Amino acid sequence: MAQLLPVMLERAGILIIVAFLLSRLKSFRKIINHEYVMKEKLILITVFGVFGIISNYTGIEIYHHSISEEWHIGGLSGESAIANTRIMGVAIAGLLGGPVVGLGAGLIAGVHRLTFGGYTGIACGISTILAGIITGILGKRFNIRKKNSHLKAVVIGVLMECVQMGIILLIARPFDSAMELVKIIAFPMITINGFGTLIFMLIIQTILLEEDRTKTLQTHKALYIAQLTLPFFRKGLNVESCERVAEIILKHTGADAVSITDQYQVLSHVGLASDHHIPLKSMSTRLTQKVLELGVIQKATTKEEIQCFREDCPLHSAIVLPLIAHSQVVGTLKLYFKNSNGLSRVDEELVEGLGMLFSTQLEFAEAEQQRKLLKDAEIKALQAQVHPHFLFNAINTISCLIRTDADKARKLLLQLSTFFRSNLQGARQMQIPLEKELEHVQAYLTLEQARFPDKYSVTIDIAESIKNTMIPPFTLQPLVENAVHHAFKQRKKKGIISIQAFEENGKINITTIDNGIGMTEDQQKKLGNQTVHSKEGTGTALWNIKKRINEIYGQDGDFTIESEPSSGTKITIILPVDQQKWGEKYAQGLYSG
């Protein structure tokens, strides 16, 4: 007995080392952390069945009263028996996986033991199978996966070894040899298997404890990511906000690509496969369509399940979450991975938590957008109005030219059409490209200059690089109209209007300058801040423009008026560049052709 104990400890140490190395494998940890389905049960049966086979091969042969310390690699004679740690692996299988896993591992290890022979072969085989079934039932009853339950597992493991000793005494013959064998192996096997079970369960408990710790960290990470994304999601689902959100998620998760869609198209895609998962294009995967239709999370572990239209797509697994606002699916959040097991259970919970947080943010964003839309309704009504005198004057001018200059009349008629189309477009859109606003201005000026050909001249200097910059509609045209109607009254010299737009210090700078009559300091304070009532007008245009810039850009935008009596007026509009970058993509998709 004294000689057997250290040898068995040595052999048990081999299994403990293997178990420790196994616990470091991501796939094994993933199985331990999951609720077991049949696939995972089969894996556990295989793993712990192999543990039983290894225990048989590393067992210690006992012939009569002598103990062989050599590694056992063959069969046993009819007068030999074997002491090993086979029950330990089978017991742990049952404790972790339940009766099915315990029975499966017990059958593998028990049948393998039968092939070794020896007068205890049948008894050991039967006891191994029973150990798997019994520990499976007890493990399910006492929930060994709970914290601080390893001592229960040790007691169950010791009990199984005692059962094995009893079965050897009941079945193995001759009885005298069986009794002598039990006297030699009982204490070492019960002690070593109990100790091994304790170490193994501590390893399992460590895995579960690390999972809990990771969940805590993931919760903190989810809240941190939500905090970073809040300013962008408050703007709703658009290209710019979604691109920034996707970049943040990609940086703080293990995903290889992140994509966000609305109900109809991809709004952003960062990371791998950006060459064909393109913003403002239709969905690239059927998996996304399924989430939009069903409103539930979908996971794909193979390239085929993702169903991307590109055969060479490097993305092989994904999790797609619905983004829900007011009980309706408004879009999806997609995390892609380049390998099939890239997403752990903890990562899934992080992503699911983010999906819920993002959905809440979108609801708040929608409420805020509705508040802004209510404020904007009055502004839109003002934008859609056309001064009747301008319309009548334009028609009269064209009518007069039809007989004297038909080509010019036709061109003016086209410009009038452009002017009206721009009015209608501006009433429907929150933002339009700068070059579209310039078309509106040029149409207006062409019609006005046809009436007063020598009253004023206009110069336009717009940097080519910012022509696709998105700006609020009716931003420049009302300023030019103000100058035409008010700046040159009671002025004998020819009026000059200059329009400039350029990028400077990370800002888009748009200015209109005239050499008109100017205004007093008191007028400057009122214009743009409130409507005024006078014979010349109400100042609604300037107030309208400034209010919309404040609503859309907040402190990042600016609207200033500089003027002195008899020295003209300069109006400057400043818009942030970083909120305009998405405008180029949007403009190309919406206004191409």
Image (cartoon, helix red, strand yellow):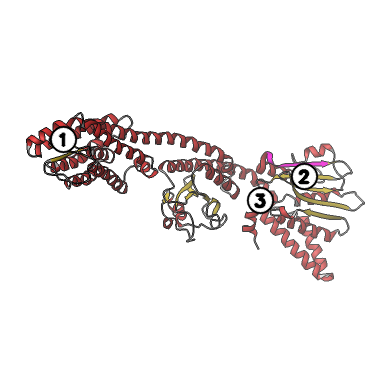
Q: Secondary structure at mark 3?
A: loop
Residue 169, image x, y percentages: 10, 35
Q: Can the viewer see residue 33?
A: no
Q: Which residue is mark 1?
A: 66
Residue 367 marker = none
With 489 as the anchor, is 338 left or right in this view?
left
| Image quarter of residue 554 | top right
Crowding near the residue tagged with mark 3, few <14, some 14–19, many ≥20 C-alpha atoms within 10 Å: some
Residue 407, image x, y percentages: 80, 70
Q: Secondary structure at mark 2?
A: strand
Instruction: State the residue in front, 299 or 437.
Output: 299
Chain part drawn in magenta: 555-562
Q: Can the viewer see residue 199?
A: yes
Crowding near the residue tagged with mark 2, few <14, some 14–19, many ≥20 C-alpha atoms within 10 Å: some
Three-letter amino acid code at disc 3?
Answer: Gln
Q: Is residue 370 magenta?
A: no
Three-letter amino acid code at disc 1?
Answer: Ser
In front of the other: label 2 or label 1?
1
- Mainly helix, strand or loop, the magenta region? strand
Quadrant including the C terminus: bottom right
Q: Which residue is mark 3?
A: 431
Q: Which residue is mark 2?
A: 572
Above or below 437: residue 96 = above
Quadrant including the N terminus: top left
Residue 181, image x, y percentages: 13, 34
- The residue drawn where x is 76% and y is 55% is 441
Looking at the image, how many numbered discs can be counted on the residues? 3
Q: Secondary structure at mark 1?
A: strand
